[in-house]
Image: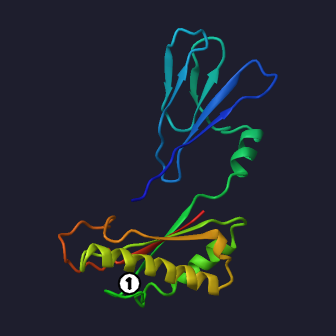
Amino acid sequence: MHRSFTVAALFALAGCAHSSLVLLPDEDGGHGAVAVLSPDGTGQETVVGEANSRAMLGKGKPTIRPLGAKGLNPREAALIGSLPPPAKSFTLYFVEGTTDMTATSAPRIEEIRTEIAGRPGADVQVTGHTDTVGSGDDNDVLSQKRAEEIMNLLAERGFDRSIMSAVGRGERELQVETEDNVDSPVNRRVEVIVR
């Protein structure tokens, strides 16, 4: 399951009379909301729920305004610019009952290698999955072997195993829900997340 997280940044500048909260969209263009409690101790809250908005925080109720044409101030832009890039996900598919990638998935290993190499301090999560053909126990073993196979391929390309983790989820997290013992190519996969 793909989840996206909202980027909300609080910028409190020491020595300033006011602080502000900036709500930015996430990498998918969505956003959440942030509840700001009033500083007077009444428990009154203001919800900041509009992407690309700034809430001025001070003594009274926060004032919420769109960022406008100027956008972020230079300090905020520098802070956002220093964040690591969002995680990137890759999906590789497998031949039924094996740890052999499909012909269309094999070239994606080079894409994964390039992504890892371009990230100082990369962290790589490799998760194996199966369809529902076979027993649950056998699918747990097969999904783990698929994840380890991909981790081994990446290690052969020069990446330290300490930056990678491999786990098998068997048939517990199906991409497409099916009945038991259904051959499903989209469920026979390994998901690689590079952070």
Question: Quick one: quadrant of the N terminus?
Answer: bottom left
Q: Which residue shows up at 46% across the image and 46% down it?
A: 30
Q: Return the x and y of residue 47 as percentages of the image width and height.
A: 48, 25
Front residue (pair 161, 86): 161
Q: Amino acid at mark 1?
A: Phe
Q: Looking at the image, how many numbered discs can be counted on the residues?
A: 1
Question: Quick one: quadrant of the C terminus?
Answer: bottom right
Q: Which quadrant would residue 19 be assigned to in this image?
A: top right
Residue projecting furthest to the front: 137
Q: Which residue shows up at 69% across the image and 67% down it?
A: 119
Q: Is residue 130 visible?
A: no
Q: Which residue shows up at 38% across the image and 80% down it?
A: 142
The residue pinned by badge 1 equals 94
Q: Which residue shows up at 80% across the image and 26% down it?
A: 14
Task: Indicate left or right for 157 with 191 as reference.
Answer: right
Up the image or down, 33 lies above or below 171; here it is above
Q: Which quadrant would residue 194 be assigned to in this image?
A: bottom right
Up the image or down, 101 lies above or below 40; here it is below
Up the image or down, 43 lies above or below 33; here it is above
